[in-house]
Amino acid sequence: MKLAPSDKLAPLLETYPSLVDFLAGYSPKFEKLKNPLLRKTVGKLATLDQVARMGDIPVDRLLRVLAAEIARATGEDVGLETGGEPAAPAAFTDRESRKEVLKDIIRDLHRGGDVETLRKRFADLVAGVSGSEIAAMEQELMAEGLPEEDVRKLCDIHVQVFKDALDQNPAPSAVPGHPLHTLAAENRALEKLVAETRAVLSALPASAGAADWGGQKLKLHALLDSLAQLEKHYLKKENQLFPALEAKGISGPSKVMWAVHDDVRAHLKDLRRAVEANDKTLAAKAGAFVLAEITDMIYKEEKIFFPMCLETLDDKDWARVKRGEDEVGYAWIEPGREWAPAGPAGEGKAGETEANRPEASALVELDTGSLPPDLLNLILCRLPVDISFVDEKDEVRYYSASPERVFPRSPGIIGRTVQNCHPPKSIEVVNRILAEFKAGTRDQAEFWIEMRGRFIHVRYFAVRDAGGRYRGCLEVSQDATGVRSLRGEKRLLDWE
């Protein structure tokens, strides 16, 4: 027999099964061939030339060692095909094989592989990769045990490797009024704002001191105030799109993206502090860094995240996302009106129709009285605190839709696990609190923070039934700024 670069790997392994262990021992890069799934996907379609490229070794060397091992194990005389350089291999085109190749490239990146070498391997082996495939690959790697933090740290390098392919994919389009059209329109406004901020920072004089800032400081304050609206853009993703994807079993990319959101939030604060301190050098460095982060996030949204959302979510999902947008708000733009979510006539809240909406006259029996559901809802929304309830399965079941909530909420969080409602850096503490509540060792947790000039008091209470069984956790948040400043007395008779 003769071996040629164009021979497929799978038939060779079927004929000579011992080659699996041999190749795994020959190079750590071939250890993956022990995975049956990989052999059924990549192995089924891969030529020996492609296998050599995956292993970063010359194809002629691979042919020689395979021929020698087959001869040693079986005594067969194995020849090698000659006739010049092999033609460039066709790239993998089926989705499963591409995904396995992508995962292999990322594993090598995490082991410190050379970016340019891996970029070439990607160009040789993978064709027509989509943003959703990259997101799915990251999801599977985290499910296999790759730490979420590692994925986040190397996310920018991932994008560098895949950038040439992603640049060829047009940004997804949607009808004005569709949530993705709105987010894309916000990105266009954000790009202009980033450019204006860069221009002001680059024009700062090199000398130190407050006097020579002139009008630049006022401009920067105005630009930073406008950049603060980025919070609404990120919240729509965190409270609307992330839950919709999680319901489809996709959570990994969202967690990575949320961690980057928090980095941007923190670095915008660093920039504001540098401006307040009249530190031009620090302001220029902090500004360049965070504006690059924001620009990179726009690229990841439009080349990876938005295509994944369009591919994954259906019309009902988009309708639910749309209904929650107004509660979060819009950054810099007014959304279009051409697109409207499809749904039954009279549809109200997510999943609620005329057929299943509670009658206003039906009473909810309480320990100390009874109230119609609509009045009970009005009372809960009129409380001077925000409340949210998480059941014993850690799923969000309710939040009070107060006009001015301390922390934004939207319908997309209903049914979502509470762990996915917090940024990654907070999850460990959330789990500790819930674990103690469930164990019965604690009944309350209390925190307070200062946020945008306000004093916020946050308390968590374990909810137990008459038998002491844990039924869930109640979160109560209050803007206590005014309460904290009270002095003396103001009696009922003093009211005017």
Image: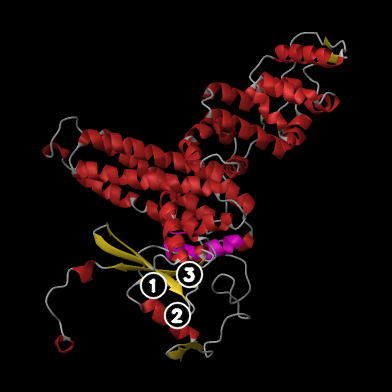
Residue appearing at x 38%, y 51% in the figure: 230
Residue appearing at x 46%, y 37% in the figure: 153
Q: Nearer the viewer, mark 3 or mark 1?
A: 3
The image shows residue 219, relative to residue 61, as above or below, that is: below
Residue appearing at x 47%, y 41% in the figure: 149
Q: Nearer the viewer, residue 334 or 88?
A: 88
Secondary element at image label 3: strand
Secondary element at image label 1: loop
Q: CA distance from mark 3 to mark 2?
A: 20 Å
Question: Could you classify mark 2 by the number of other residues whose Cα lies within 10 Å: few (under 14), some (14-19), or many (20 or more)?
Answer: few
Does the CB distance between marks 3 and 2 fall below 8 Å? no
**Of the residues under marks 3 and 1, which one precedes in the sequence?**
1
Instruction: Return the residue at label 3.
Output: 472
Can residue 179 be seen at all in this image of the molecule? no
Q: CA distance from mark 2 to mark 1?
A: 10 Å
- Residue stretch in magenta: 317-336
Secondary element at image label 2: helix
Instruction: Return the residue at label 1.
Output: 402
Q: Quadrant of the C terminus?
A: bottom left
Q: Nearer the viewer, mark 3 or mark 2?
A: 3
